Amino acid sequence: MTHPEDLLADYVDGTLDERQRAVVDAHLVGCSSCGEEVAMARRALSALASLEDEPVPFGVTGPVLAEAGRRLEGRRTVLWERLQWAFGAAAAAALVLVVALNLGGGADPDQDAAREETTAVEAEAGAAATGAGGESSLAFAFQGLERQEGVEYDDAGIVALARDAVPTVTGQAPEAADQGTLAPADDALACIERSGAPTVGDPRDTLLRLIEAEYAGTPAYIAVYAEGPGAGQPADRVVVWAVAVEDCRILTTASLRI
Amino acid sequence: MSDPGVRDEDLVRRYLSGDRTAFAALVERHERRVYNIALRMTGREEDARDVAQDAFLTVLRKLSSFRGEAAFTTWLHRVTVNACYDLLRKRQRAPLLERGGEDDRPVAEPPPVPDHSDMTALSIDVQRALLAVPDDFRVVMILHDVRDLPQEEVAAVLGIPVGTVKSRLHRGRIALARALGVPRSGERPDPTTPSEGTMTP
């Protein structure tokens, strides 16, 4: 007897066309072993349906994101060094040109005055740009930087921070938590922003706490955010990012659904 | 956090152009899929964590060479499956004492799944039985029956003909049913023997 093995998977899936299905049906009438296999395959499929997705544990993707940040940072450094080299070469060429012109003609007082004016305008433009960029675009509802000297967090500690923030997000905290002595947060905020943490600047995210402590032996800024789905819906997740104080690379991240 | 309307391939381009958040969005979008394939293939949370990290780090390293000939998800699945095989091979090579048992069959390796309070006894049994199915059959079942990938995509991920996917699917299901202890009678000899899905005399 010839068994239609190559059709049985699709037969169990119910994806055979009518003609093929009729072939298998006819075969099954007289073949108990194929009938038994079809029954077993159906039981296996039914068993597999009991396997539900497991949530991803905390800390799995943090190192990956940190590496992604480091790679971009490395690329920027290389680009910057190349740019500096190119700029240096161009400046040297310009200097050679200026020297050559001066040797040929001597200084022109009018040209010097014009150069000074240009420099003053550039300086003003630079100051304006600094002013515009000096203010952080972060939307936050926290009280300031919490300096926790001598405190070291591990992955469990990061998760605990997320868990502790849940009552604040759900409005079940009895009162505002005492965050101790608070310090100016500008450097820490700039570092979090520089790290590329996707929460920064996202209107769905609200900064709850910003901590300076250590993560796994590395001085770190740790930001705790409430995150919502958008469209004016309330926050449904707490997200924690830890970034290195030294170079703002992402050290780890944790996410807790409320 | 990530806009579902944005294509994976666009996120890849954005990251390669210097947008760090684009890679975070890719990871967020696919981490559950990658982790759960790894969990079902390896049966252990700690191994699944390692596989997921390895897979994403491989993606990161090779992202600049991703030309988009295949869909990003197909490529990601391939990288994930390869990371699973790497780990399973390492596990095979590990000294018996490190594995904490005298039996080197995968099904004997504890614990099979994380001990979540809402995990039913049935799914634990299924996961345990799944580990008794040969790797090449298990991966096909996980991609098609658990992750709902079409057979054609499973074939593309694994680099095998669709006919082989069909054959492995059927044989894997029967192997799983046997491992679950389903009563049987009148079966043909060992259906886990590889076949290319042709008519068998």
Image (cartoon, coloured by chain):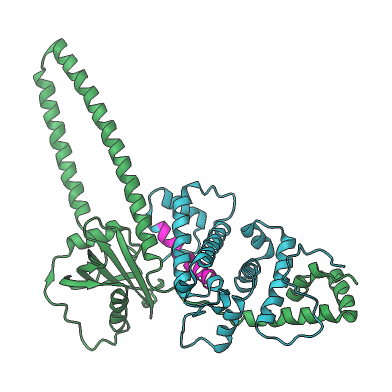
Between residues B1 and A162, which one lies in front from this camera angle? Answer: A162
Q: Is residue B57 inside the magenta stretch?
A: no
Q: Which chain corresponds to the colour cyan?
A: B
Q: Is residue B122 left or right of residue A148?
A: right
Left or right: where A83 falls relative to B133 = left
The image shows residue B145, relative to residue B59, as above or below, that is below
Left or right: B170 with respect to A124? right
> Which region shows up in magenta?
B22-39
Q: Is residue A135 visible?
A: yes
> In the displayed structure, would residue A156 be above or below residue B89?
below
Of residues B102 and B167, which is closer to you in this image? B102
Image quadrant where residue B106 sits: bottom right
Q: Position of residue B103 (x, y in %)?
A: 55, 77
Residue at the image point whose x is 60% and y is 82% from the top: B126
Q: Which chain is green?
A: A
Whole-percent x, y for residue A117 in the image: 13, 31
**Would you say residue A137 is visible in this rendering?**
no
**Along the horizontal axis of the image, is A183 left or right of A54?**
left
User: Which quarter of the rendered picture does the N terminus of chain A lie within?
Assistant: bottom right
| Magenta span main SS | helix
Whole-percent x, y for residue A108 in the image: 11, 17
> x, y (%) of residue B181?
67, 86
- What residue is drawn where x is 26% and y is 69%? A223
Q: Nearer the viewer, residue B17 or A85?
A: A85
At x 55%, y 60%, the residue is B82
Name the quarter where the C terminus of chain A is drawn: bottom left
* Residue B33 is inside the magenta segment: yes
